[in-house]
Amino acid sequence: MFENLSGRMRDAARSLTGKGRLTESNIKDTLRQVRLALLEADVALPVVKLFIERIRERAVGEEVSKSLTPGQSLVKIIHSELVSILGASSASLDLKAQPPVVIMLAGLQGAGKTTTAAKLAKRLIDVERKKVMLVSVDIHRPAAILQLQTLAAEVGALHCSSASTEKPAKIVERSLDEARRCHADVLIVDTAGRLHVDDDMMAEVVAVHKAAAPRETLFVVDSMAGQDAVNAATVFDESLPLTGIILTKADGDAKGGVALSVREVTGKPILFLGVGEKIDALEAFHPDRMASRILGMGDVLSLVEEIEDNVEKEKAEKLARKLKKGRGFDLSDLRDQLQQMANMGGLATLLDKLPIPGNVSPAALKGGADDKQIARQIAVINSMTPGERRFPKVINGSRKKRIAAGCGLQIQDVNRLLKQHRQMEKMMKKMSRGGMQKMLRGMPGGTLRPGF
């Protein structure tokens, strides 16, 4: 997300290199670049105008600190304004009410409401330790009702059945009674969507809202919908007392303008980002961290939180003890590392949260790094015998041929994986003998990334 915008913003800041201070003349071209970057990212025109004017007012005539270049000073101002436009501070769900607390999801068809309902339920179950019930009032699409029932079972949530012959408001009333009987803490109501906003749809969703009396009314919007998303957000905000926004498909959107536009147009906080197809791919939204990602500064705090959530501490401690005793880093250990990386969304997702130097392209760093790449590496290791994983040196030509055939890949793929393992094994030995400095000196070019 924000890849295009990040690159343009960095280019704009670099155009001020060598200037002694920020003046109206030397930031004119820079602000033009920022304006074009925002428009190309599908940010709504009124939001762009407001954003540029705020930057201009703060930037013109500002003295540049001795510790900063003019480009860095402008980036600091842009970062501050981005945080302001994205919501200034993080917001969270308000669950302080008599159970069951009702959360209602609204939005257009295709925005990902049903999947988001399940993701939100999983987050509430895992993080908040809540007992959650899901119900669908989308009587126009029986498949959506069945989908939510399946997802509820997958995430460990309760499910209230519904039928296309029932009135949505009646379904809500029945689900509230059932949630009380089951002692559910939270009831998530998945409403119907349409391909476009119409009077019937809005009348139905207003009636559902009246029956549910939700504590939270969340607008679910597709990050890739562009200006249509902004228009829909405006209409829903006029019809419903929205309390927050969830952006879906953020991982597939290189522009990111919807995040800036919807927050400014509705004035409602963005609470969560859908960042993948997996059922746990829902991130809390932090305006300051997102502003840093837009400007290529990374989001190390979110990365650390993600690592803490996904890394299996027992395996990590076991590996540390193993290395301390002088035992080698074998292919089973490498598979564990790859699986944990896959659980965090792959190398590309991790790179999105790391600070990228101004002269380095994020696309160049990512290369072909994706979930499929890691899956191929794991498949190669799974095709080996336990003995081969423990003692990789025994893998000769005939064994490589068998391993490649077993995972449906080429012998070259097996060779690349073995080479990567040897490099990592050397680093692990240096870590156990002399710490991080030796390890960094031993890394080719200072970095290591998956080999195919």
Image (cartoon, helix red, strand yellow):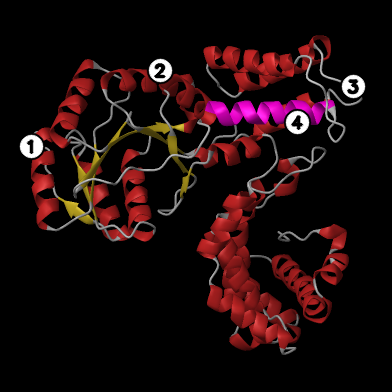
Mark 4 or mark 3: whose residue is earlier in sequence: 4
Mark 4 or mark 2: whose residue is earlier in sequence: 4
Residue 402 screen position, x and y as percent: 64, 78
Residue of label 2: 231
Question: Was residue 75 drawn as part of the magenta stretch in this picture?
Answer: yes
Identify the residue shown where x is 62% and y is 69%: 337
The residue positioned farthest toward the top in the image shown? 25
Quadrant in which the C terminus is drawn: bottom right
Q: Which of the two residues, 208 or 404, is positioned nearer the viewer here?
A: 208
Q: Nearer the viewer, mark 3 or mark 1?
A: 3
- The amino acid type found where label 4 is placed reads Arg
* Residue 170: numbered disc: 1
Residue of label 4: 10
Measure the alpha-carbon separation of dots 4 and 3: 16 Å
Measure the alpha-carbon separation of dots 4 and 2: 29 Å
Mark 1 or mark 4: whose residue is earlier in sequence: 4
Dot 1 alpha-carbon crowd within 10 angstroms: few under 14, some 14 to 19, many 20 or more = some
Residue of label 3: 19
Mark 2 or mark 3: whose residue is earlier in sequence: 3
Mark 3 or mark 1: whose residue is earlier in sequence: 3
429 horizontally vs 83: left or right: right
Q: Are marks 2 and 1 in contact (CB under 8 Å)?
A: no
Q: Tag 1, which secondary structure?
A: helix
